[in-house]
Image (cartoon, rainbow, N blue to C red):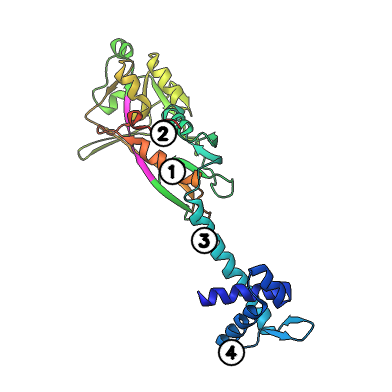
Amino acid sequence: MDSFSGMTIFVQVAELRSFGAAGRHLGISASAVSKGVARLEQKLGVRLFQRSTRSVSLTAEGTLFLERCRRILAEIAAAEHELASTTASPQGRLRVSLPLVSGLMWPVLSAFVSHYPQIELDLDFSDRLVDVVDEGFDAVVRTGELSDSRLMSKRLGISHFVCVGAPRYFEQYGMPERPEDIARHACLMHRVPSTGLLEKWRLRRDDEDADLRPAASMTSNHLETLRHMAIQGHGIAYLPDFAVRTAIDHGELVTVLNEWAGASSTFWILWPSNRLLLPRVRAFVDFMAKHLILHSKQSFVYSSNKFPPKN
């Protein structure tokens, strides 16, 4: 603390070029300022100022020390601001990138807005691989493997793919009993936006694997469009469980090849590691991690009964 006090006094004298002016700025006497500088010079073993009756100027050593002190004091001020901001009310604009599964996100986003009305959400729905830092996003939600070392991350959960179709479709065309039977059906294929390739239908049973890329009766890069077309009876789709859970519960879709497990995908929330974690970003990260949760049957559900009350 003595070093910190000495550096504060030294910087004020260096910037104001006056012991008296520095004392008035700091609320102490000119004598106290002079003694503080003298103690610092004695500790360092160098003279920091050239003094005369009319002026105060930095020595070469003082000029070098001034730059160091400014950086140290700036870091301390930033640390104090960071600690103070953790107790501040979350507010301001929050720019977030989310995958093209808006139906999955709508309930939890609505609850977030109700709970934090002073946060202005700026939402970008896209499946492209965004550059979180360079494009100025505060946070992103994505699936897959993590590769950017500039980002902090928190896992939201895991989704699993299932093969689904409308009951009336299977009444007309029959249900596939093995993966190879898929080739005889109309298949609604997902085109991966980041690569432009059709997504493989990966299935596994015990030690037996089946990687299918069936002929497409329709392709789309939008999961909700594929779900709608499947509900309308246009074919079989290979979709993540969170996208079809409600339709299955309502009897609009049924799963097939249930003894075969589909591929899994991990959902992450990511944010830049080199920025001050503002209260609004922390609030969003914590809210998503708490309220977008996994069901015991390995499908995404919303813990709507656990949403906090509106402010």
**What's the amino acid at mark 4?**
Gly
Q: Earlier in the sequence, mark 2 or mark 4?
A: 4
Please give the name of the residue rendered at 51% of the width and 38% of the height, measured from the top-left corner: 97
Magenta span includes 288: no
- Tag 1 or tag 2, which sits nearer the N-term? 2
Residue 199: image location, x then y, percent: 41, 33
Closest to the observer, 265 or 207? 265
Residue type, label 1: Val
Residue 288 location in percent, x, y? 41, 39
Q: Nearer the viewer, mark 2 or mark 3?
A: 3
Instruction: Mark 2 vs mark 4: give the one in front.
Output: 4
Mark 4: secondary structure: loop
Q: Which residue is mark 1?
A: 285
Return the mark for residue 45.
4
Q: Nearer the viewer, mark 3 or mark 1?
A: 3
Q: Which residue is mark 2?
A: 199
Query: Magenta segment range?
Result: 155-163
* Amino acid carrying mark 2 in the image: Glu
At numbered mark 2, what does the secondary structure look like: helix, strand or loop? loop
Image: 124 above or below 79:
above
When asked about the image quadrant of residue 9, the answer is bottom right
Q: Point out residue 48 in the picture as x, y percentages from the top left corner.
A: 66, 84
Q: CA distance from mark 3 to mark 1?
A: 21 Å
296 sits left or right of 17 in the view: left
Q: Which residue is mark 3?
A: 79
Q: How far apart are the alpha carbons under marks 2 and 4?
A: 70 Å
Crowding at mark 1 (Cα within 10 Å: few <14, some 14-19, many 20+): many
